[in-house]
Amino acid sequence: MCGIVGAVAQRNIVPVLVQGLRRLEYRGYDSCGVAVIVDGVARCARSVSRVADLEQKILDSQLLGETGIAHTRWATHGAPVTHNAHPIFSHETIALVHNGIIENHEILREGLCENGYKFVTQTDSEVIAHLIYSVYKNDLFAAVRAAVKQLHGAYAIAVFSTDQPHLVCCARGGSPLVVGLGKSENFLASDALALAGSTNRLIFLKEGDVVELTLDRVRIADCNGDLVQRQVHTVNTYSSAVELGPYQHFMHKEIFEQPRAISDTIAHIDAFDPELFGAGARDVFNKIDSLLILACGTSYYSGLTAKYWLESIAKIPTQVEIASEYRYRDSVPNHRSLVVVISQSGETADTLAGLKHANELGHLHTMAICNVEGSAIVRLTALRFLTHAGTEIGVASTKAFTTQLVALFVLSVTLEWLRGHADSSLLAQHLKQLRHLPAALNSVLSLEPQIIAWAEEFSSKENVLFLGRGMHYPIALEGALKLKETSYIHAEAYPAGELKHGPLALVTEAMPVVTVAPNDMLLEKLKSNIQEVRARGGQLYVFADADTRIVNDEGLHVIRMPEHYGLLSPILHVVPLQLLAYHTACARGTDVDKPRNLAKSVTVE
Ligand code: G6P
């Protein structure tokens, strides 16, 4: 959601700050701003529109500076209006940007007001600026260290003081921050992606770190206030993640990256060894009698799909729950259950809170399936499996979803084996299928021209219904989610057997019905559902496996999937639905990578 960039240099740093903000745009925001020091005075530009608008304002006002901080804000406390946009000031001396939420802001505000401080924003962040000012005595590093001790909640902050040019401080407490080392210049950001192109020498800050950056020095104090050295990482992968290459949108690029992402995710797997999930996993897997999966959004749908695998092949009872529901309801903890949290970002507030809630209830075993090493969720779980999708920028998740499914399939097979339901030849067969998956996905991606033709037809529709059965029902849900979030067409998904219990009433020529039709044991049932739609004049669009004998006919449009893929079929069938959503959105001219009102990482409730 919110994003931070900061820099000190001996050149105009504003273009670096703006480029950093552009790279953070994908996370979602509703206002943005930048502040620099010019001759001992802070100058600032803000916008409640896009970063491009901020850039224009910067050009118009000829804003230049060698020390600066910048921010994209997702409003929580206070509306997304100009005066609430960061940077936020105290006494025109301290400028601050903040990610996260300060839980004790009201009490701090009361104390500051009693001491004569005037508040001009409705943000919780303003208390931090005033707190720093209240203890500032020409040593910003010391003031920030003193001030953050009073904060409860989550924060990543960057601060400058107008009377200390070429110096920026930052602090991390619950929200990520990275420092970038340059030559006689230094940088900071909430996401390493923002610094791609400026430096590849990065320090990933630890919880409680407070940092002072000057032109040629970076000083870090840890949570105890002791000066410490942190490891410097050379990271080159971020630059390619932020380049579109031949693609027009990141969503399109990321759909086509899926064969590579899956190869990378399974590269180290030679056997279904419990240790793939961390040291001690075998012991935990032998103790558990069930799974409780918690997640949000697309990650929730990967959990729903996995339930079919876990119960059918590993024969282990599995409950899948939306994290925001779980955290607020009374539930009965089972101490022999493994709590699995699934998250692309590892920072989603509800998933994190769901995990903490499970811990508070006394759950003993936790595991993360996550795409971001070192993220909050990974840090809080004993076991983990990292997917290697690479940075995902499009708000609509694609490659993160299919790699999560791969991870969950590996988990299912590992439990199948440990629980005595698979022999070595079955394991070898599963492994062979996994390894062939990237090639199978490439064949599915070659269906794109046919899908583009369908997308043209869909672009004029207002409602679309998706149907699936069994483990392809969650895939229908994911297809509907992809279409609604990218094209703004109302879409919903049903298990096909439920048609006659309601959605059939909606079927007319005007509403396309998309059906996922794998060649599995439910095929004949699905064919009956297809006839129910046709008999009512509905237009069916079917992704059918070979040998299903579903062929083009009046009211029945068929795209043939290259091969039937057994248990892993959901991973293949979701890809045409991603492409259908993407091309429909393009035909409608929406902002595909940054759909309105949505954010990539939902770090607030
Ligand atoms: C947001 C994103 C979705 C994502 C969901 C969960 O809604 O737009 O793409 O599926 O958050 O995010 P997570 O990072 O926990 O998987």
Image (cartoon, rainbow, N blue to C red):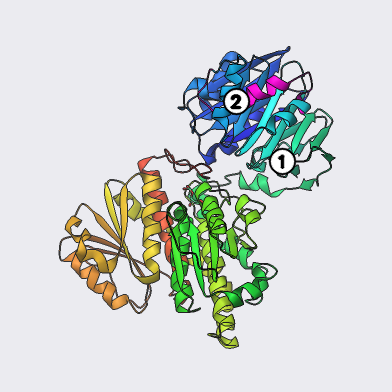
Q: Whole-Å distance between the Cαs marked 1 and 2?
A: 19 Å
Note whether 270 is above or below 542 in the view shown: below
The percent position of residue 46, horizontal first and vertical second, equals 54, 21
Note whether 220 is above or below 433 in the view shown: above
The percent position of residue 304, horizontal first and vertical second, equals 43, 64
Residue drawn at point x = 51 percent, y = 54 percent: 354
The percent position of residue 446, horizontal first and vertical second, equals 46, 62
Give whichever of 398, 205 is nearer the camera.
205
Give whichever of 318, 107 is nearer the camera.
107
The label shown at residue 61 is: none
Amino acid type of the residue that numbered disc 1 sits on in the rendered structure = Gly
Q: In this figure, which residue is indicated by the disc labeled 1?
A: 208
Q: Indicate left or right for 480 with 569 as reference.
A: left
Residue 136 in magenta stretch: yes
Residue 581 in magenta stretch: no
Q: Indicate left or right for 63 with 235 as reference.
A: left
The label shown at residue 127 is: 2
Please report whichever mark, 1 or 2, sits nearer to the chain's N-terminal start: 2
Q: Indicate left or right for 126 with 141 as reference.
A: left
Q: Quadrant of residue 43?
A: top right
